[in-house]
Structures are given as C-alpha cells and as structure tokens.
Image (cartoon, rainbow, N blue to C red):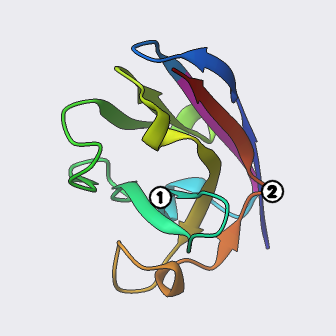
Amino acid sequence: QVQLVETGGGLVQAGGSLRLSCTTSGRTFSNYKMGWFRQAPGREREFVAAISWSAISTYYADSVKGRFTISRDDAKNTVYLQMNSLNSEDTAVYYCAAGARVGLRTVASYDYWGQGTQVTVSS
C-alpha cells in the first residue's frame, strides 16, 4: 500500500500562484509514476500533469501547459505541482496519484490516490 497526503491548497486571486505537495509513505516512491488530477463540481476527474518514475519525462494537459510544473524529490518521497497564472477555470479539488501501470493520463492508470486538496481561484 501507498499512502498519499496532499497539502498546499487554498484561496488565491486570479493571476496568483500556489504550490501543491504530495508526500507518500509505504512502498518505494521512486518505483511509481506520479500524477496530479483535478475535479471541479459537477465534472469528471481530469488529468493535469504526470512525471515518470525516473523524472526524465513530464506530461501536461493542454489547459495547464506553460503555467504548471510538476517535479519530484525521491529523497523526500514528495511530488510537487507549481501552479502559476491561475484563473477561475483552475478551481477544483486537486488529487495526487501514484501508479505502476501503463498509461499516464487516465484515472485507471493509477493505483493509489490522496484525499485531495481544494484550490479556489477568485476573480
């Protein structure tokens, strides 16, 4: 089992920045690809960003490309999501996920999930 805990959410004005953190415990963190997803009220959970187990590759949804940056620190068992130039469309609960399956952009590609952290962007 892998436990994931997200922190760093909150209320921010449009154009502002937040950094989310996701700390894991349990199995070897470096063995898993890590992803961030988000879910707004009334909408399905959607892919935001992912990083490979080796941190060689990163992937982003088109809606956040150029504004968000995913990174990982295997020594701290932590993955980060730096979010800049936030707008109201980014308001959602953000979830961290870990997985070893094939695939990066779908919910089904991940085995373990955090409880989520709320990000609210005010205009």
The stretch of residues the image draws in magenta is: 19-25
Q: Residue at x 54, y 77 (%)?
A: 110
The residue lying at 43 percent from left, 27 percent from top is: 83
Residue 22 covered by magenta stretch = yes
Where, by quadrant of the figure, is residue 71 drawn? top left
Q: Position of residue 35 (x, y in %)?
A: 47, 58
At x 74%, y 58%, the residue is 114
> Label 2, on which residue?
115
Amino acid type for the residue under numbered disc 2:
Gln
Q: Is residue 56 above or below residue 122?
A: below
Comparing 99 with 37, the one in front is 37
- Read off the residue under disc 1: 35
Placement of 91 over or under 25, stated as above or below: above
Q: Nearer the viewer, residue 46 or 55?
A: 46
Residue at the (52%, 79%) spot, across then down:
107
Left or right of residue 115, residue 123 in this image: left
Q: Is residue 27 left or right of residue 99?
A: right
Q: Position of residue 73 (x, y in %)?
A: 49, 34
Looking at the image, residue 23 lies above or below residue 9: below
Q: How many marks?
A: 2
**99 sits to left or right of 8:** left
Secondary-structure class at tag 2: loop
The answer to whether 81 is drawn above or below residue 27 in the figure is above
Q: Is residue 116 magenta?
A: no
